[in-house]
Amino acid sequence: MAATIGLEPRRERLGIGPVGLGRLVACEVLAAASAPAWLLPRPTGYIASGVAALAIAAIVLLSLRGVGHRLAVRFRQRGLRKRARVTPTKGDTLSALAPRLNIAGVIERDVEYGIGFDGNGWFVGIAIQDEDPGTPTGLSARTLGSVARVLLDPAATVSGIQIVSHLIPAPSAELDPDAACIESYRELLGDDPTVSHHTTWVAIRLDVTDAYTVAEERGGGVEGARRAVTAMTGRLLKRLTDAGVGHRVLGADGLRVVLTHSVSGETVSASLAERAVEEWSGWRIGSQLNVTFGIDGSVDDINGLRRLWTALAMVSASFSTLSVTLRPWRRGGTSETEITVESLLRVAYDDEVDDGVAAELTDAARECGIRLWRFDGEQAVAAYASAPTGGGYPGR
Protein backbone atom coordinates (compact mmCIF):
# COMPACT_ATOMS: atom_id res chain seq x y z
CA MET A 1 0.00 0.00 0.00
CA ALA A 2 2.89 2.32 0.72
CA ALA A 3 3.90 2.44 -2.92
CA THR A 4 0.35 3.11 -4.02
CA ILE A 5 -0.40 6.14 -1.90
CA GLY A 6 3.10 7.60 -1.77
CA LEU A 7 4.05 6.66 1.78
CA GLU A 8 7.39 5.51 3.04
CA PRO A 9 7.12 1.78 3.76
CA ARG A 10 7.17 0.88 7.41
CA ARG A 11 10.51 -0.57 8.45
CA GLU A 12 10.52 -4.11 9.72
CA ARG A 13 11.01 -4.38 13.45
CA LEU A 14 14.25 -5.82 14.78
CA GLY A 15 14.25 -9.48 15.73
CA ILE A 16 14.11 -12.94 14.21
CA GLY A 17 10.93 -13.73 12.29
CA PRO A 18 7.87 -13.14 14.49
CA VAL A 19 9.99 -12.85 17.65
CA GLY A 20 10.74 -9.17 18.31
CA LEU A 21 13.93 -7.74 19.76
CA GLY A 22 12.42 -7.22 23.22
CA ARG A 23 11.36 -10.85 23.46
CA LEU A 24 14.76 -12.02 22.21
CA VAL A 25 16.41 -10.04 24.99
CA ALA A 26 14.01 -11.60 27.50
CA CYS A 27 15.01 -15.07 26.28
CA GLU A 28 18.69 -14.22 26.65
CA VAL A 29 18.15 -12.89 30.18
CA LEU A 30 16.30 -16.07 31.18
CA ALA A 31 19.06 -18.25 29.78
CA ALA A 32 21.76 -16.22 31.52
CA ALA A 33 19.87 -16.19 34.82
CA SER A 34 19.63 -19.98 34.88
CA ALA A 35 23.38 -20.53 34.33
CA PRO A 36 24.57 -19.75 37.92
CA ALA A 37 22.16 -22.37 39.25
CA TRP A 38 24.52 -25.09 38.00
CA LEU A 39 27.01 -23.99 40.65
CA LEU A 40 24.53 -24.97 43.35
CA PRO A 41 23.84 -28.52 44.56
CA ARG A 42 21.74 -30.80 42.39
CA PRO A 43 18.99 -30.66 41.21
CA THR A 44 18.91 -26.84 41.38
CA GLY A 45 20.54 -26.46 37.96
CA TYR A 46 18.07 -28.80 36.29
CA ILE A 47 15.09 -27.07 37.87
CA ALA A 48 16.28 -23.56 36.96
CA SER A 49 17.11 -24.58 33.39
CA GLY A 50 13.76 -26.32 33.01
CA VAL A 51 11.85 -23.26 34.20
CA ALA A 52 13.87 -21.02 31.87
CA ALA A 53 13.26 -23.36 28.93
CA LEU A 54 9.51 -23.36 29.56
CA ALA A 55 9.44 -19.57 29.82
CA ILE A 56 11.43 -19.19 26.58
CA ALA A 57 9.11 -21.64 24.80
CA ALA A 58 6.08 -19.66 26.00
CA ILE A 59 7.59 -16.40 24.69
CA VAL A 60 8.25 -17.93 21.27
CA LEU A 61 4.78 -19.50 21.06
CA LEU A 62 3.06 -16.25 21.98
CA SER A 63 4.99 -14.55 19.18
CA LEU A 64 3.32 -16.77 16.61
CA ARG A 65 0.01 -15.31 15.41
CA GLY A 66 -1.98 -18.52 15.22
CA VAL A 67 -0.82 -20.13 18.46
CA GLY A 68 -0.80 -16.87 20.41
CA HIS A 69 -4.29 -16.01 19.27
CA ARG A 70 -5.68 -19.39 20.31
CA LEU A 71 -4.03 -19.24 23.71
CA ALA A 72 -5.32 -15.71 24.30
CA VAL A 73 -8.94 -16.77 23.78
CA ARG A 74 -8.72 -20.20 25.42
CA PHE A 75 -10.98 -19.31 28.34
CA ARG A 76 -13.51 -17.65 26.02
CA GLN A 77 -13.54 -20.79 23.93
CA ARG A 78 -14.38 -22.92 26.94
CA GLY A 79 -17.23 -20.62 27.94
CA LEU A 80 -18.66 -20.36 24.44
CA ARG A 81 -18.67 -24.11 24.09
CA LYS A 82 -20.69 -24.45 27.28
CA ARG A 83 -23.21 -21.78 26.28
CA ALA A 84 -23.56 -19.24 23.52
CA ARG A 85 -23.99 -15.60 24.49
CA VAL A 86 -27.61 -14.95 23.55
CA THR A 87 -28.95 -11.41 23.27
CA PRO A 88 -32.58 -10.57 22.42
CA THR A 89 -32.57 -8.26 19.41
CA LYS A 90 -36.20 -7.04 19.51
CA GLY A 91 -35.61 -5.93 15.94
CA ASP A 92 -32.46 -3.96 16.88
CA THR A 93 -29.41 -6.01 15.90
CA LEU A 94 -27.09 -3.05 16.46
CA SER A 95 -27.93 -2.77 20.16
CA ALA A 96 -27.47 -6.51 20.55
CA LEU A 97 -23.93 -6.16 19.22
CA ALA A 98 -22.94 -2.91 20.98
CA PRO A 99 -25.20 -2.35 24.02
CA ARG A 100 -23.34 0.79 25.15
CA LEU A 101 -23.55 2.51 21.78
CA ASN A 102 -24.93 6.03 21.91
CA ILE A 103 -25.32 8.29 18.87
CA ALA A 104 -25.78 12.05 19.21
CA GLY A 105 -26.22 14.78 16.61
CA VAL A 106 -23.92 17.82 16.71
CA ILE A 107 -24.41 20.86 14.46
CA GLU A 108 -21.26 22.51 13.13
CA ARG A 109 -21.50 25.22 10.44
CA ASP A 110 -25.06 24.19 9.59
CA VAL A 111 -24.01 20.55 9.07
CA GLU A 112 -25.20 17.77 11.38
CA TYR A 113 -22.52 15.32 12.44
CA GLY A 114 -23.69 12.01 13.86
CA ILE A 115 -21.18 11.12 16.59
CA GLY A 116 -21.20 7.61 17.98
CA PHE A 117 -19.73 6.60 21.34
CA ASP A 118 -19.37 2.89 22.12
CA GLY A 119 -17.64 3.06 25.50
CA ASN A 120 -14.15 3.02 24.02
CA GLY A 121 -14.18 5.99 21.66
CA TRP A 122 -16.04 8.49 19.48
CA PHE A 123 -16.50 8.19 15.72
CA VAL A 124 -18.13 10.00 12.79
CA GLY A 125 -19.29 8.40 9.54
CA ILE A 126 -19.04 9.69 5.97
CA ALA A 127 -20.82 8.23 2.94
CA ILE A 128 -18.61 8.12 -0.16
CA GLN A 129 -20.10 8.61 -3.60
CA ASP A 130 -19.22 5.60 -5.76
CA GLU A 131 -18.64 6.90 -9.27
CA ASP A 132 -18.19 3.51 -10.97
CA PRO A 133 -20.21 0.54 -9.68
CA GLY A 134 -17.48 -1.79 -10.89
CA THR A 135 -14.58 -0.26 -8.96
CA PRO A 136 -13.92 0.20 -5.22
CA THR A 137 -13.90 3.98 -4.72
CA GLY A 138 -12.82 3.53 -1.12
CA LEU A 139 -9.62 1.80 -2.24
CA SER A 140 -8.78 4.35 -4.93
CA ALA A 141 -5.52 6.28 -4.74
CA ARG A 142 -7.49 9.51 -4.26
CA THR A 143 -9.37 8.25 -1.21
CA LEU A 144 -6.37 6.53 0.34
CA GLY A 145 -4.19 9.57 -0.30
CA SER A 146 -6.70 11.85 1.43
CA VAL A 147 -6.82 9.57 4.47
CA ALA A 148 -3.04 9.28 4.63
CA ARG A 149 -2.54 13.06 4.56
CA VAL A 150 -4.80 13.49 7.58
CA LEU A 151 -3.07 10.71 9.52
CA LEU A 152 0.39 12.10 8.78
CA ASP A 153 -0.57 15.67 9.72
CA PRO A 154 1.38 16.51 12.92
CA ALA A 155 -1.44 18.81 14.04
CA ALA A 156 -4.09 16.09 13.78
CA THR A 157 -5.00 13.78 16.65
CA VAL A 158 -6.90 10.78 15.37
CA SER A 159 -6.87 7.14 16.45
CA GLY A 160 -7.78 5.68 13.08
CA ILE A 161 -9.63 6.17 9.81
CA GLN A 162 -11.57 3.25 8.40
CA ILE A 163 -12.77 2.57 4.87
CA VAL A 164 -15.67 0.11 4.61
CA SER A 165 -16.96 -1.41 1.37
CA HIS A 166 -20.31 -3.18 1.71
CA LEU A 167 -21.38 -5.44 -1.17
CA ILE A 168 -24.71 -7.15 -1.78
CA PRO A 169 -24.56 -9.63 -4.67
CA ALA A 170 -27.29 -9.81 -7.24
CA PRO A 171 -29.34 -11.91 -7.40
CA SER A 172 -29.76 -12.27 -3.65
CA ALA A 173 -28.31 -15.37 -2.03
CA GLU A 174 -31.42 -15.54 0.16
CA LEU A 175 -33.56 -16.50 -2.83
CA ASP A 176 -33.98 -20.06 -4.03
CA PRO A 177 -31.31 -20.54 -6.74
CA ASP A 178 -33.91 -22.35 -8.88
CA ALA A 179 -36.47 -19.55 -8.60
CA ALA A 180 -37.87 -18.23 -11.88
CA CYS A 181 -36.69 -14.68 -11.17
CA ILE A 182 -33.12 -15.95 -10.68
CA GLU A 183 -33.13 -17.78 -14.00
CA SER A 184 -34.55 -14.71 -15.74
CA TYR A 185 -31.88 -12.49 -14.22
CA ARG A 186 -29.10 -14.82 -15.35
CA GLU A 187 -30.47 -14.83 -18.88
CA LEU A 188 -30.41 -11.03 -18.93
CA LEU A 189 -26.81 -10.99 -17.71
CA GLY A 190 -25.61 -13.43 -20.33
CA ASP A 191 -21.81 -13.49 -20.25
CA ASP A 192 -21.53 -10.27 -18.25
CA PRO A 193 -20.09 -10.46 -14.72
CA THR A 194 -22.41 -10.62 -11.73
CA VAL A 195 -23.87 -7.25 -10.86
CA SER A 196 -23.88 -6.24 -7.19
CA HIS A 197 -24.94 -3.26 -5.14
CA HIS A 198 -22.13 -1.73 -3.13
CA THR A 199 -21.79 1.16 -0.71
CA THR A 200 -18.67 2.82 0.68
CA TRP A 201 -18.32 4.53 4.04
CA VAL A 202 -15.42 6.20 5.81
CA ALA A 203 -15.32 6.48 9.61
CA ILE A 204 -12.90 8.61 11.61
CA ARG A 205 -12.29 7.61 15.23
CA LEU A 206 -10.90 9.13 18.43
CA ASP A 207 -10.32 6.59 21.20
CA VAL A 208 -10.73 7.49 24.86
CA THR A 209 -7.01 6.90 25.40
CA ASP A 210 -6.13 9.51 22.75
CA ALA A 211 -8.87 12.00 23.58
CA TYR A 212 -7.75 13.50 26.89
CA THR A 213 -5.32 16.18 25.70
CA VAL A 214 -7.15 17.17 22.53
CA ALA A 215 -10.50 17.24 24.36
CA GLU A 216 -9.09 19.54 27.05
CA GLU A 217 -8.04 21.98 24.33
CA ARG A 218 -11.69 22.17 23.24
CA GLY A 219 -13.39 22.61 26.59
CA GLY A 220 -12.84 19.18 28.11
CA GLY A 221 -15.16 16.30 28.83
CA VAL A 222 -17.52 14.66 26.37
CA GLU A 223 -18.26 17.92 24.55
CA GLY A 224 -14.54 18.53 24.07
CA ALA A 225 -14.08 15.04 22.64
CA ARG A 226 -17.01 15.55 20.27
CA ARG A 227 -15.59 18.86 19.07
CA ALA A 228 -12.22 17.19 18.54
CA VAL A 229 -13.53 14.34 16.41
CA THR A 230 -15.70 16.81 14.47
CA ALA A 231 -12.65 18.98 13.77
CA MET A 232 -10.68 15.97 12.54
CA THR A 233 -13.62 15.02 10.32
CA GLY A 234 -13.54 18.52 8.84
CA ARG A 235 -9.88 18.04 7.91
CA LEU A 236 -10.71 14.78 6.16
CA LEU A 237 -13.68 16.30 4.33
CA LYS A 238 -11.46 19.05 2.97
CA ARG A 239 -8.91 16.50 1.75
CA LEU A 240 -11.62 14.45 0.06
CA THR A 241 -13.04 17.56 -1.61
CA ASP A 242 -9.61 18.60 -2.87
CA ALA A 243 -9.10 15.10 -4.29
CA GLY A 244 -12.44 15.19 -6.09
CA VAL A 245 -14.02 12.40 -4.02
CA GLY A 246 -17.78 12.87 -3.57
CA HIS A 247 -18.95 12.55 0.03
CA ARG A 248 -21.73 13.26 2.51
CA VAL A 249 -21.49 13.53 6.30
CA LEU A 250 -23.86 11.21 8.14
CA GLY A 251 -26.18 12.75 10.71
CA ALA A 252 -27.28 10.92 13.85
CA ASP A 253 -30.14 9.06 12.17
CA GLY A 254 -28.08 8.37 9.07
CA LEU A 255 -25.20 6.93 11.10
CA ARG A 256 -27.52 4.56 12.97
CA VAL A 257 -29.11 3.39 9.72
CA VAL A 258 -25.70 2.80 8.13
CA LEU A 259 -24.40 0.86 11.14
CA THR A 260 -27.52 -1.32 11.20
CA HIS A 261 -27.26 -1.91 7.47
CA SER A 262 -23.58 -2.83 7.75
CA VAL A 263 -24.17 -5.26 10.62
CA SER A 264 -27.27 -7.06 9.36
CA GLY A 265 -27.55 -6.10 5.71
CA GLU A 266 -31.23 -5.49 6.53
CA THR A 267 -31.88 -8.92 5.07
CA VAL A 268 -35.16 -10.77 5.55
CA SER A 269 -33.58 -13.33 7.89
CA ALA A 270 -32.05 -10.59 10.06
CA SER A 271 -35.27 -8.57 10.24
CA LEU A 272 -37.20 -11.64 11.41
CA ALA A 273 -34.59 -12.61 14.00
CA GLU A 274 -35.64 -12.43 17.65
CA ARG A 275 -32.18 -12.93 19.10
CA ALA A 276 -28.47 -12.68 18.32
CA VAL A 277 -26.11 -15.45 19.37
CA GLU A 278 -22.33 -15.33 19.53
CA GLU A 279 -20.95 -18.73 18.65
CA TRP A 280 -17.33 -19.81 18.57
CA SER A 281 -17.10 -19.62 14.77
CA GLY A 282 -19.53 -16.79 14.01
CA TRP A 283 -22.07 -14.22 15.15
CA ARG A 284 -25.60 -15.33 14.32
CA ILE A 285 -28.69 -13.21 13.72
CA GLY A 286 -31.53 -15.68 13.33
CA SER A 287 -30.54 -17.95 10.45
CA GLN A 288 -27.92 -15.49 9.19
CA LEU A 289 -24.34 -16.26 10.23
CA ASN A 290 -21.71 -13.49 10.18
CA VAL A 291 -18.12 -14.75 9.94
CA THR A 292 -15.24 -12.28 10.19
CA PHE A 293 -11.72 -12.90 8.93
CA GLY A 294 -8.49 -11.02 9.43
CA ILE A 295 -6.06 -10.62 6.56
CA ASP A 296 -2.81 -12.34 7.43
CA GLY A 297 0.22 -10.06 7.57
CA SER A 298 0.52 -6.59 6.06
CA VAL A 299 -0.84 -5.87 2.61
CA ASP A 300 1.78 -3.83 0.77
CA ASP A 301 0.07 -4.16 -2.61
CA ILE A 302 -3.33 -2.47 -2.54
CA ASN A 303 -4.14 -4.14 -5.85
CA GLY A 304 -4.53 -7.42 -3.96
CA LEU A 305 -7.37 -5.89 -1.93
CA ARG A 306 -8.91 -4.45 -5.07
CA ARG A 307 -8.90 -7.87 -6.73
CA LEU A 308 -10.46 -9.34 -3.61
CA TRP A 309 -13.15 -6.65 -3.66
CA THR A 310 -14.05 -7.66 -7.22
CA ALA A 311 -14.08 -11.35 -6.28
CA LEU A 312 -16.56 -10.71 -3.45
CA ALA A 313 -19.31 -10.04 -6.00
CA MET A 314 -19.05 -13.69 -7.07
CA VAL A 315 -19.32 -15.15 -3.55
CA SER A 316 -22.76 -16.63 -2.86
CA ALA A 317 -23.38 -14.69 0.35
CA SER A 318 -26.19 -12.45 1.58
CA PHE A 319 -23.60 -9.65 1.76
CA SER A 320 -19.87 -9.10 2.25
CA THR A 321 -17.98 -6.34 4.03
CA LEU A 322 -14.36 -5.34 3.48
CA SER A 323 -12.92 -3.05 6.16
CA VAL A 324 -9.51 -1.34 5.90
CA THR A 325 -8.45 0.70 8.94
CA LEU A 326 -5.40 2.95 8.81
CA ARG A 327 -3.85 4.10 12.08
CA PRO A 328 -0.99 6.50 12.87
CA TRP A 329 2.03 4.83 14.45
CA ARG A 330 4.69 6.96 16.09
CA ARG A 331 8.15 5.70 16.91
CA GLY A 332 9.12 6.08 20.54
CA GLY A 333 11.21 9.16 21.24
CA THR A 334 10.70 10.60 17.74
CA SER A 335 8.12 12.70 15.94
CA GLU A 336 8.16 10.39 12.92
CA THR A 337 4.71 9.09 12.01
CA GLU A 338 3.98 6.02 9.93
CA ILE A 339 0.75 4.27 9.03
CA THR A 340 -0.31 0.76 9.96
CA VAL A 341 -3.08 -1.11 8.17
CA GLU A 342 -5.61 -3.54 9.63
CA SER A 343 -7.96 -5.28 7.22
CA LEU A 344 -11.06 -7.30 8.09
CA LEU A 345 -13.38 -9.26 5.85
CA ARG A 346 -16.88 -10.28 6.96
CA VAL A 347 -19.31 -12.48 5.08
CA ALA A 348 -22.96 -13.13 6.01
CA TYR A 349 -24.94 -16.13 4.81
CA ASP A 350 -27.51 -18.74 5.79
CA ASP A 351 -25.38 -21.75 6.71
CA GLU A 352 -28.43 -24.03 6.63
CA VAL A 353 -28.81 -23.29 2.92
CA ASP A 354 -25.12 -23.18 1.98
CA ASP A 355 -22.43 -23.96 4.55
CA GLY A 356 -19.58 -23.66 2.06
CA VAL A 357 -19.54 -19.86 1.75
CA ALA A 358 -16.64 -19.36 4.18
CA ALA A 359 -14.51 -21.86 2.27
CA GLU A 360 -15.56 -20.21 -1.00
CA LEU A 361 -14.39 -16.85 0.35
CA THR A 362 -11.07 -18.29 1.56
CA ASP A 363 -10.43 -19.78 -1.88
CA ALA A 364 -11.27 -16.49 -3.60
CA ALA A 365 -8.86 -14.63 -1.32
CA ARG A 366 -6.12 -17.16 -1.98
CA GLU A 367 -6.50 -16.62 -5.72
CA CYS A 368 -5.93 -12.91 -5.05
CA GLY A 369 -2.72 -13.68 -3.15
CA ILE A 370 -4.30 -13.00 0.26
CA ARG A 371 -4.37 -15.34 3.24
CA LEU A 372 -7.22 -15.11 5.74
CA TRP A 373 -7.56 -16.19 9.37
CA ARG A 374 -10.80 -16.39 11.35
CA PHE A 375 -11.66 -14.42 14.47
CA ASP A 376 -13.00 -17.58 16.12
CA GLY A 377 -13.89 -16.87 19.73
CA GLU A 378 -14.12 -13.12 19.03
CA GLN A 379 -16.67 -13.02 16.22
CA ALA A 380 -19.05 -10.52 17.86
CA VAL A 381 -16.44 -7.82 18.52
CA ALA A 382 -14.87 -8.46 15.12
CA ALA A 383 -18.24 -7.97 13.42
CA TYR A 384 -18.61 -4.63 15.17
CA ALA A 385 -15.04 -3.62 14.30
CA SER A 386 -15.69 -4.30 10.60
CA ALA A 387 -18.73 -1.96 10.64
CA PRO A 388 -18.06 1.77 10.01
CA THR A 389 -16.99 2.56 13.59
CA GLY A 390 -13.44 3.62 12.82
CA GLY A 391 -12.24 0.09 13.55
CA GLY A 392 -13.32 0.26 17.18
CA TYR A 393 -14.38 -2.44 19.60
CA PRO A 394 -17.58 -2.16 21.65
CA GLY A 395 -17.48 -1.56 25.38
CA ARG A 396 -19.45 -3.91 27.59
Image (tube, grey):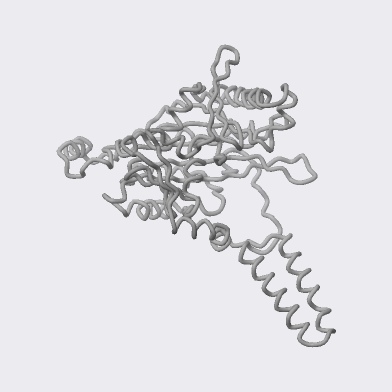
Observer able to see residue 305: yes
Residue 366 vertical placement versus 235 (above, below): below
Task: Identify the image quadrant of residue 66.
Answer: bottom right
Can residue 314 be spotted in the picture? no
In the image: residue 39, left or right of residue 253: right
Task: Please state the horizontal and vertical placement of residue 359, each as a whole percent of the image.
Answer: 36, 55
| 331 lies left or right of 285 | right
* Quadrant position of residue 261: top left
Position in image of residue 329 (x %, y %): 68, 43
Asked if residue 325 lies left or right of residue 208, the reply is: left
Label tally: 0
Indicate the quadrant where residue 393 lies. Answer: top right
Q: Position of residue 137 (x, y in %)?
A: 46, 32
Horizontal and vertical percent position of residue 61: 61, 66
* In this rendering, position of residue 47 left or right of residue 126: right
- Residue at left offset 46%, top offset 28%: 256
Question: In the rendered view, would you say 370 is above or below 335?
Answer: below
Residue 188 lies, with reference to residue 354, above or below; the image says: above
Kindly identify the residue that appears in the image at 69 percent across and 60 percent down: 20
Look at the image and tell me in which quarter the N terminus lies: top right
The C terminus: image quadrant:
top right
Q: Residue furthest left?
A: 180
Q: Residue furthest bottom?
A: 42
